[in-house]
Image: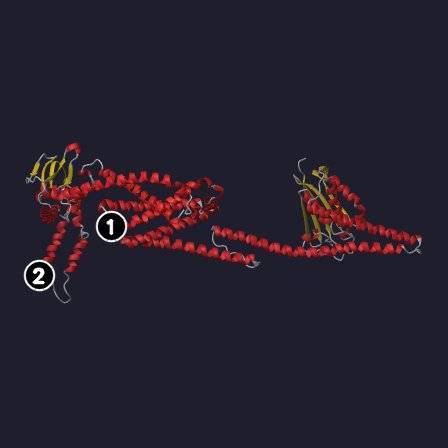
């Protein structure tokens, strides 16, 4: 279908929609005034007749206030007397003020006339503070001058009213006094407004509301409100144009109503006729690509702006009965907006079945905002700052329009606005510094910690980043150490495996010599047996520690008496300990200490530790072994004096292939402590090694478990 024809049909629908909206506006904004009401019941009557003419009649023509009434209604009160006395200060300050005004010039004397004038004023001030009747008389004189000024202004306003509105007639009765006031010039061409029917009275005031002294007079003697019944006759020359305008607006209202209904009917039939072609229109292709939420927002905005412009068009039609330039431009713009609105509306309705919340823009937006309140303190701080900045800007705009607000705006700016901006900018600067430091951290620069300022959420975040930094430093240190230990591990494994293997190869070659004596052959076989056993032990220990490190080992737990197990382990190593001339001191309670453990594995831990003592303890020293019941744990302690210097790093002693004998002259795989530590760890216990000079101490804490 031709695109121009498609646009033409949509624009026609847009014009019909505008006519329907105009009808809606007409009924929403003007139906109350234009349907089923007399002219005197409309707002137009109030503006053109009541406020300008009828309400002013009592004060201008019917029953204007007189000087005598104003003088009789005036009552002097004690507060007025006191206010007059202290109008210029207390007695002493007023007397001092007068005396200062009559001080003689230096070198001259005050004339008798000035002295007499000064004394009269001083006497007058003293009498003000002594005689209430004297002050009351002054106040009445002052009031009379104001009343005279009021009457002069009233007469001027009455003359203006008579000239501006000649021919006004009335027959009104004061509902309070019963007095009737008539002024009927016999004009027949008038509009009569009657009061007193259905409880509607003419409510007004006898004071001149256009008088400059009105509020001051009313404050002293009251407002002189009155209520009248009767009729007011207004010449048609005043009200005829307003009535004609009212009837014209009624006619326009009904024309718009008929046109709107016709537009609704025509639009319905045109849509049914064009529906298939319009729904296949290429105009929907770019619109349908947009997210449903975006289309909904755009459609809502188009409708809102169109409705607002339509209200202005309706106002222009009802008040100007046609199209001025602004109304004509608004109508063209509104037709375009409504055409676009119809396209978006139809697009939404026809594709609503394809909407899925899981893939919607709304879900993505909510998920994007979900993190806003992960830390409520930071979120509310940001919201409060934005609110302060908004109202500060709004207040600045109002101050430019209303100068009197400057007295409020300045302190609010000094004590709220500027501190809020400083708080915002300082937080942004702090965030920028933290982000810059984070970039350095990602590059591996760990020399400087993150800055911690105050107790804000950003400061907490900086603390957490410092923790990450410390962990990174530790990780780097651990990595360096791991690389060193890995290198040592390869060296030690190579050395410990190569030594017995070399001996085996050497003695195997020697056994091939046919000239060997039986005694030599037996010695060589004995060496091969010992070296093979040594190699076997190394390989088995290596497999065991590898399985324990990977967790690929099962524990056969049972109820075991730890005290008996320890005594058995000591007994089996007694010969090796005595060979080194070691004096073993054992501290085991008389009561059995049971624990749910793998007895074979725990025995191996004890055996490895005792073997370690027999190899590396200084000969001729004491060895202390103790077992204690610590409630939920069994605590074993092994202490001995080392034959070799161990250094300060206890962690390295439990590393694989690490031996107390750095020169590696003694037998051993260097895996004993590592295996012991792994077995204790698998039981959920603790394996602690400590050094105090040459004193070597191992503490085992084994949980008893649920027995």
Residue 101 falls left or right of residue 434: left
Q: Which of marks 1 and 2 is nearer the N terminus?
A: 2
Q: How is the image coloured?
A: secondary structure
Position of residue 277 measured from the top left corner of the image (x, y, whole percent): 40, 43
**Residue appearing at x 69%, y 38% in the figure:** 596
Residue furthest out toward the bottom: 107
Residue 54 falls left or right of residue 331: left
Residue 375 falls left or right of residue 579: left
Label 1 or label 2, whichever lies nearer to me, is 1
At numbered mark 2, what does the secondary structure look like: helix, strand or loop?
helix
The answer to whether one can see residue 361 in this image is: yes
Mark number, residue 112: 2
Q: In which quarter of the image is the C terminus?
A: top right
Front residue of 690 and 543:
543
Q: How crowded is mark 1: few (under 14 residues within 10 Å), some or many (20 or more)?
A: few
Residue position marked by numbered label 1 in the rendering:
324
Question: Could you tell me how far apart the alpha carbons at marks 1 and 2 are, in whole angstroms?
Answer: 80 Å
**Residue appearing at x 43%, y 50% in the figure:** 382
């Amino acid at each position: 279908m031709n695109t121009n024809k498609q646009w033409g049909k949509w624009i026609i629908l847009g014009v019909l929609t505008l006519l329907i909206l105009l009808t809606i506006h007409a009924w929403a904004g003007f139906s109350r005034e234009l349907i089923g009401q007399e002219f005197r019941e409309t707002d137009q009557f109030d503006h053109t007749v009541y406020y300008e003419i009828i309400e002013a009649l009592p004060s201008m023509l019917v029953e204007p206030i007189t000087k005598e009434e104003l003088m009789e209604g005036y009552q002097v009160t004690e507060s007025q007397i006191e206010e007059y006395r202290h109008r210029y200060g207390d007695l002493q300050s007023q007397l001092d003020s007068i005396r200062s005004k009559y001080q003689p010039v230096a070198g001259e004397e005050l004339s008798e006339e000035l002295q007499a004038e000064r004394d009269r004023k001083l006497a007058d001030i003293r009498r003000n503070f002594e005689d209430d009747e004297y002050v009351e008389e002054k106040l009445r004189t002052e009031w009379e001058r104001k009343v005279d000024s009021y009457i002069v202004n009233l007469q001027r306003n009455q003359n203006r009213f008579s000239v501006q509105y000649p021919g006004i007639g009335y027959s009104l009765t004061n509902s309070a006094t019963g007095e009737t006031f008539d002024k009927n010039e016999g004009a027949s061409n008038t509009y009569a407004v009657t009061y007193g029917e259905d409880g509607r009275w003419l409510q007004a005031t006898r004071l001149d509301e256009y008088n400059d002294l009105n509020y001051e007079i009313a404050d002293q003697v009251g407002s002189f409100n009155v209520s009248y019944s009767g009729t007011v006759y207004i010449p048609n020359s005043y009200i005829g144009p307003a009535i004609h305008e009212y009837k014209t607006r009624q006619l326009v209202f009904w024309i718009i109503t008929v046109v709107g209904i016709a537009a609704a009917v025509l639009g319905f039939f045109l849509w049914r006729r064009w529906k298939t072609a319009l729904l296949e229109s290429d105009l929907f292709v770019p619109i349908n690509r947009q997210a449903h939420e975006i289309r909904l927002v755009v459609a809502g905005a188009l409708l809102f702006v169109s409705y607002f412009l339509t209200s202005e068009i309706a106002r222009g039609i009802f008040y100007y009965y046609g199209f001025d330039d602004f109304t004509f431009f608004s109508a063209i713009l509104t037709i375009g907006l409504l055409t676009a609105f119809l396209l978006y509306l139809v697009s939404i309705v026809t594709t609503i079945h394809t909407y899925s919340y899981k893939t919607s823009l709304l879900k993505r937006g909510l998920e994007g905002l979900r993190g806003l309140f992960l830390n409520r303190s930071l979120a509310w701080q940001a919201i409060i700052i934005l609110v302060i900045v908004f109202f500060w800007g709004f207040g600045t705009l109002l101050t430019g329009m209303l100068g009197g607000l400057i007295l409020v705006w300045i302190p609010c700016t000094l004590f709220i606005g500027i501190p809020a901006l400083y708080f915002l900018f300082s937080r942004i600067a702090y965030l920028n510094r933290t982000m810059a430091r984070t970039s350095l951290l990602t590059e591996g620069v760990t020399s400087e910690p993150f800055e911690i300022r105050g107790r804000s959420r950003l400061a907490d975040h900086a603390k957490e980043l410092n923790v990450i930094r410390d962990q990174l430093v530790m990780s780097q240190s651990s990595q360096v150490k791991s690389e060193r230990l890995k290198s040592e591990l390869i060296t030690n494994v190579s050395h410990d495996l190569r030594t017995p293997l070399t001996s085996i190869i050497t003695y195997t070659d020697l056994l091939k010599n046919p000239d060997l004596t039986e005694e030599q052959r037996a010695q060589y076989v004995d060496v091969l047996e010992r070296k093979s056993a040594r190699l076997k032990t190394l390989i088995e220990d290596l497999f065991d520690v590898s399985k324990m490190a990977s967790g690929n080992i099962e524990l056969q737990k049972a109820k075991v008496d730890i005290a008996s197990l320890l005594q058995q382990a000591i007994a089996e190593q007694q010969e090796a300990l005595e060979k080194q001339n070691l004096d073993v001191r054992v501290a085991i309670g008389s009561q059995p200490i049971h624990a749910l453990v793998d007895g074979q594995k725990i025995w191996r831990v004890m055996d490895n530790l005792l073997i370690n003592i027999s190899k590396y303890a200084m000969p001729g020293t004491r060895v202390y072994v103790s077992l204690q019941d610590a409630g939920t744990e069994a605590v074993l302690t092994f202490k001995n004096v080392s034959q070799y210097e161990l250094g300060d790093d206890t962690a390295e002693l439990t590393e694989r292939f690490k031996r107390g004998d750095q020169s590696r002259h003694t037998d051993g795989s260097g895996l004993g402590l590592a295996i012991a530590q792994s077995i204790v760890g698998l039981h959920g216990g603790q394996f602690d090694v400590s050094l105090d000079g040459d004193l070597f101490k191992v503490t085992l804490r084994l949980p008893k478990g649920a027995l």
